[in-house]
Image (cartoon, helix red, strand yellow):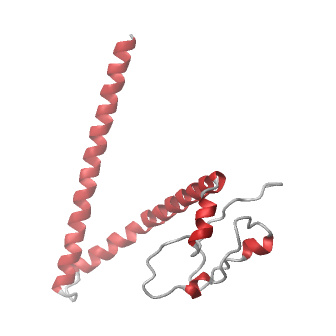
Amino acid sequence: MGERKPLLLVTDPPYGIELDSEWRDRAGLNSCGAAEPSYMKHRVEGHTETTISGDTRAELKWMKQPEFDAAYREARGVAFRQAVARLQQASGAAVSTLLKIMVDQSAPHSTRVRAADSVLDHAGKAIEIEDIEARVTELERAAELAKSSVRG
């Protein structure tokens, strides 16, 4: 990265690792106010506010900076796309699990019915998506033909 300093780093730490919310202070990078130490320890029962840092005031200050906001949104999109890719990679194992449960004679009937219902539901949604994709492709082709006939 050379002389450039990153505005934002998004990671998914392993479970059991405590977040170090003060690293920006130690690195001299926190121009938006000191981080609240160990915010997870300060959570109270019934806390309904969802924030990045646990400190709404500091978070709002950061989000008002266009560069930070853009970097945050980009990083959030990357993290989400990676999560979706992981889900897609695990989908084969999930289907295998559903199918095994569905045909397992020793499994409770309600569990087998739930697995069968899930398989049918997902299969139906997949068919709907394929149909929509085919219709969109046909509409795009027709629009392109109409556009080329107007030009020519």
Give residue 68's position: percent from left, percent from top.
64, 57
Q: Where is the N terminus found, in terms of image quarters?
A: bottom right
| Residue found 27% across the figure and 45% down from its top | 132
How many discs mark residues in the rendered view?
0
Which residue is more in the foreground, 46 or 71? 46
Instruction: Name the residue at the right extreme.
Output: 3
Residue 124: name its quadrant.
bottom left
Residue 139 vertical position relative to residue 64 in the rendered view, above or below: above
Residue 132 vertical position relative to residue 14 in the rendered view, above or below: above
Residue 133 vertical position relative to residue 114 in the rendered view, above or below: above
120 lies left or right of 67: left
117 lies left or right of 78: left
Which residue is more in the foreground, 133 or 101? 133
Give residue 142's position: percent from left, percent from top.
30, 26
Give residue 136's position: percent from left, percent from top.
31, 38
Q: Where is the C terminus found, in terms of image quarters?
A: top left
Which residue is more in the foreground, 70 or 97? 70
Instruction: Name the residue at the top extreme.
Output: 152
Which residue is more in the foreground, 86 or 81? 81
| Residue found 83% across the figure and 54% down from its top | 3
| Residue found 45% across the figure and 65% down from its top | 89
Residue 29: name its quadrant.
bottom right
| Residue found 26% across the figure and 63% down from its top | 122
